[in-house]
Image (cartoon, rainbow, N blue to C red):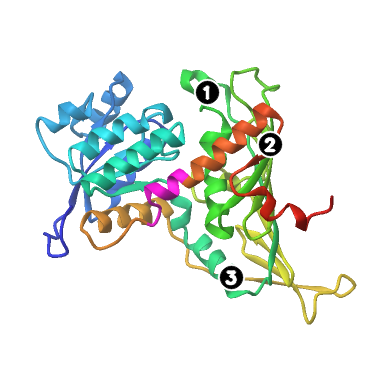
Amino acid sequence: MMSNQSRTKPLNIAVMGAGLIGKRHVEGVLAEADAALCAIIDPSEAGRDFALGKGMSWFATFSELAQTQRPDGVIVATPNQLHVANALEVIHARIPVLVEKPIADNSEAATALVDAGSRLGIPILVGHHRRHNPMLQEAKRILESGRLGKILTVQGTFWVAKPKDYFEVEWRQKSGGGPTFINLIHDVDLFRYFFGNVEAVFAMESNSARGHCVEDSAVILLRFATGALGTLNASDAVASPWSWEMTSGENPAFPRQNQFCYQIGGTNGSLAIPQLDLWMNASDPDWLEPLVESRVPYASSDPLALQLKHFCDVIRGNAEPLVSGQEGIATLRVIEAIKSSARSGQMVYLGKPDAWRGHVND
């Protein structure tokens, strides 16, 4: 890793994986003044053609790239099942790595990856890029300011209609390819960022829309260590305006809808995201009194671009990872608990159930 006194010329970044998110990372590196795209790594013909179409160096594997050059950093955007193996290659070459979410298929593999990075002193960042979004940073400041009072509950909706050709990629029909791992992991990570650790999970899943081996719909209950309760309702087979993708404007590929996807409720008021609409009574909270709506301003910026700038800062030794490997593991464990609960039909505890069970009605 480079020191604070390192050269200031652009850092050479390689992108491993030329799928949907990999292509966005490629475009981001090409647009970033502090970075230069040195290679695209993807074994497929489509990946090769994409790289050549961009006029970029192409390699089928990281080992082939390593024989000719040494990048300053690598972004791993391969299918979920390959994240650990690909990231370990990069770490063992002693190169900082940004791993797309989820950090791994399971927390044991993720722990092995993070331990390897720690032993070698190589930073690992996890691609939960929403934490870099200025709007969500402002939402966190609102929550931490106490304006909403004690946070009691949150609900999130992810309803989208993925087209048939999305599932022509075979791994999206198999374990780990459903919306819980691909999409809800972002929402879970954001909820952890806002509300702290999750202590208990109860979930149900269904694959009734397509009959694939993975879920197309899920409903999840969460209990946080603070005592706050949350719900996540998800489906990738429902045409709707209610999802982060459709409401935030984060990804211009999605038609933006003037709707919300998250609602956060506290003892003094509530907050709608992404609009950052605050709803509060003029004086003490009272359901018989009119609510006053106000919108909190923020400066919009592309979180993927901000994440890349942050990655460059980490490579240069000027910052610590905002979303570390340990954070990636903690979020992944919640996802594992969701999948376990959906399989068993039972509540899954990540904390100590006796610590809070007495605070609810028997």
Q: Residue furthest right?
A: 288
User: What residue appears at the point 51 percent right and 27 percent down from the top-left corner?
Assistant: 176
User: Which mark sits nearer the N-terminus, 2 or 1?
Assistant: 1
Mark 2 vs mark 1, CA separation in Å: 17 Å
Q: Which residue is mark 1?
A: 175
Residue 191 in the image, given as x and y percentages of width and height: 58, 53
Query: How many neighbours does mark 3 have within 10 angstroms: few (below 14), some (14-19), or many (20 or more)?
Result: some
Identify which amino acid the numbered label 2 is placed on.
Ala
User: What residue appears at the point 31 percent right and 56 percent down from the top-left corner?
Assistant: 309
Residue 120 in the image, given as x and y percentages of width and height: 21, 45
Predominant SS along the magenta part: helix
Q: Is residue 114 depicted above or below 83 in this figure?
A: below
User: Which mark sits nearer the N-terminus, 3 or 1?
Assistant: 3
Identify which amino acid the numbered label 1 is placed on.
Ser
Q: Is residue 127 depicted above or below 89 in this figure?
A: below
Residue 331 in the image, given as x and y percentages of width and height: 50, 45
Q: Is residue 104 magenta?
A: no
Viewer-nearest residue: 319 or 237 = 319
User: What residue appears at the point 77 percent right and 80 percent down from the top-left corner?
Assistant: 282
Q: Is residue 327 magenta?
A: yes
Which span is picked out in magenta?
322-329
Q: Which residue is mark 2?
A: 203
Q: Which residue is mark 3?
A: 142
